[in-house]
């Protein structure tokens, strides 16, 4: 089933944004719909579901067992998802003294801003697409398309700091 089909199926099951459900059920339904939209946009499905479970949890942190229960997913699926989210800088692991269970938590310092400020992803994509363009015939339409892609990634990289600053100001101004 495609991600778009999953969003449509969840809409049908939950009545849009979870209408008719209340409390935890409504939150879980809304989080699943949002995760499906993330997946439709290209974010891996299980990490999207895990991220939304953490974001919508009261403390912003859950154990692997809690994530597994909340998501109805295997321990292996949760492990892979939190590993991915740790790699991209969205979550971190917190050891709990006296317990073998770790908490997986969102960063307190606006995780999305920190992850984007410290992410070299657009620089890397620009370099990789430049390298691809160099393998294509000079003057070819393919080379022009790939070079344009590299320019776009450099553009995003150059604009990201100002965009994040604007977002921080927007957040501070919100009631």
Image (tube, rainbow, N blue to C red):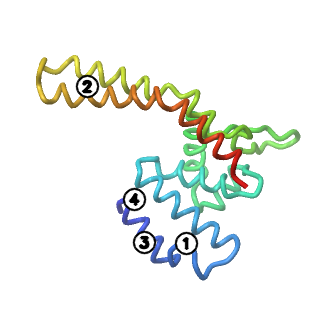
Which image quarter: residue 95? Answer: top right
**Which one is in front in this view, the residue at disc 2 or the one at disc 4?**
2
Of 97 and 90, nearer the camera is 90
Q: CA distance from mark 2 to mark 1?
A: 41 Å
Pick out the residue farthest to the right.
98
Q: Reply above or below: 77 against 146.
A: below
Give me the disc on residue 17: 1
Answer left or right for 136 relative to 131: left
For the residue labelled by badge 2, is the local secondary structure a helix, a strand or a loop? Answer: helix
Residue where numbered disc 2 is placed: 147
Residue where numbered disc 3 is placed: 9
- Picture residue at 55% right of the left edge, 43% below the top: 80
- Picture residue at 40% right of the left edge, 29% below the top: 155
Asked if the residue at tag 2 contacts the one at tag 3, i.e. Cβ–Cβ closer than 8 Å, the answer is no
Q: CA distance from mark 1 to mark 4?
A: 17 Å
Q: x and y percent of residue 116 in the render?
A: 56, 33
Q: Earlier in the sequence, mark 2 or mark 4?
A: 4
Asked if the residue at tag 4 contacts the one at tag 2, i.e. Cβ–Cβ closer than 8 Å, the answer is no
Q: x and y percent of residue 160 in the render?
A: 51, 32
Asked if the residue at tag 3 contacts the one at tag 1, i.e. Cβ–Cβ closer than 8 Å, the answer is no
Of 122 and 66, nearer the camera is 122
Give me the disc on residue 3: 4
Q: Earlier in the sequence, mark 4 or mark 3?
A: 4
For the residue labelled by badge 1, is the local secondary structure a helix, a strand or a loop? Answer: loop
């Amino acid at each position: 089933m495609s991600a778009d089909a999953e969003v449509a199926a969840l809409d049908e099951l939950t009545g849009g944004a979870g209408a008719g459900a209340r409390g935890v059920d409504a939150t879980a339904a809304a989080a699943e719909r949002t995760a499906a939209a993330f997946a439709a946009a290209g974010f891996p499905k299980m990490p999207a579901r895990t991220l939304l479970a953490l974001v919508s949890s009261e403390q912003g942190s859950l154990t692997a067992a809690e994530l597994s229960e909340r998501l109805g997913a295997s321990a292996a699926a949760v492990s892979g998802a939190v590993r991915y989210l740790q790699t991209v800088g969205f979550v971190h692991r917190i050891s709990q003294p006296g317990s073998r269970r770790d908490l997986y938590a969102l960063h307190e310092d606006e995780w999305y801003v920190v992850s984007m400020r410290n992410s070299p992803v657009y620089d890397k994509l620009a370099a990789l697409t430049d390298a691809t363009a160099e393998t294509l015939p000079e003057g070819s339409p393919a080379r022009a398309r790939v070079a344009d892609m590299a320019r776009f990634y450099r553009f995003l990289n150059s604009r990201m700091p100002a965009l994040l600053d604007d977002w921080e100001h927007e957040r501070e101004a919100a009631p």
